[in-house]
Image: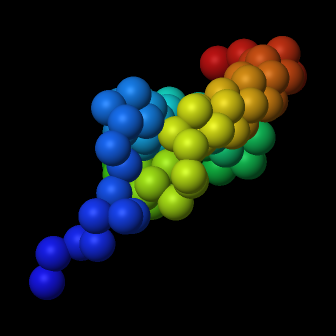
Amino acid sequence: MPANPKYLTKNPWQRFAKISAGILGGYLLSAIYHMVFALWLPFHKEVLVTIIITHFVVWCGLLIVPFLFKNGWHAWVLYLILIVIGLFLFYLGMQENPF
């Protein structure tokens, strides 16, 4: 059964925003927070080993989230805010525990 056309995005910029937010933003968000967990949790080596599997799973979940938004640019704004927060936490973690 085909999708109802009234729910499909007709604007190519919105489609680009959703796809790029899902692929690029989701990947960056997943990678940054996995590195934050590796810095802040006491068992660094175990976290780095589990990143191989959990990074892909979290990225797949974050790939779907922008398609739940009406506007793809809102998804980008949310992802960028979360990325900046993650980078700040990463910066704080590097000050306390530089490898």
**Quarter location, residue 11:** top left
Q: Which quarter shows the N terminus?
A: bottom left
Q: Is residue 87 visible?
A: yes
Q: Which one is in front, 70 or 40?
A: 70
Going 37% across and 49% down the picture, which residue do you hit? 9
Going 28% across and 72% down the picture, which residue do you hit? 4
Give left or right: position of 88 versus 49.
right
**Quarter location, residue 50:** bottom left
Going 65% across and 49% down the picture, which residue do you hit? 43
Going 56% across and 43% down the picture, which residue do you hit? 71
Q: Which one is in front, 11 or 79?
A: 11
Q: Which one is in front, 37 or 81?
A: 81
Indicate the position of residue 51 as horizontal and vertical percent values.
Answer: 44, 48
Indicate the position of residue 87 as horizontal and vertical percent values.
Answer: 71, 23
Indicate the position of residue 17 as horizontal and vertical percent values.
Answer: 44, 32
Indicate the position of residue 34 as horizontal and vertical percent values.
Answer: 57, 42
In the displayed image of the protein, which residue is found farthest to the bottom?
A: 1
Give left or right: position of 54 versus 68.
left
In the displayed image of the protein, which residue is found farthest to the left?
A: 1
In the displayed image of the protein, which residue is found farthest to the front?
A: 6
Q: Which quarter shows the C terminus?
A: top right
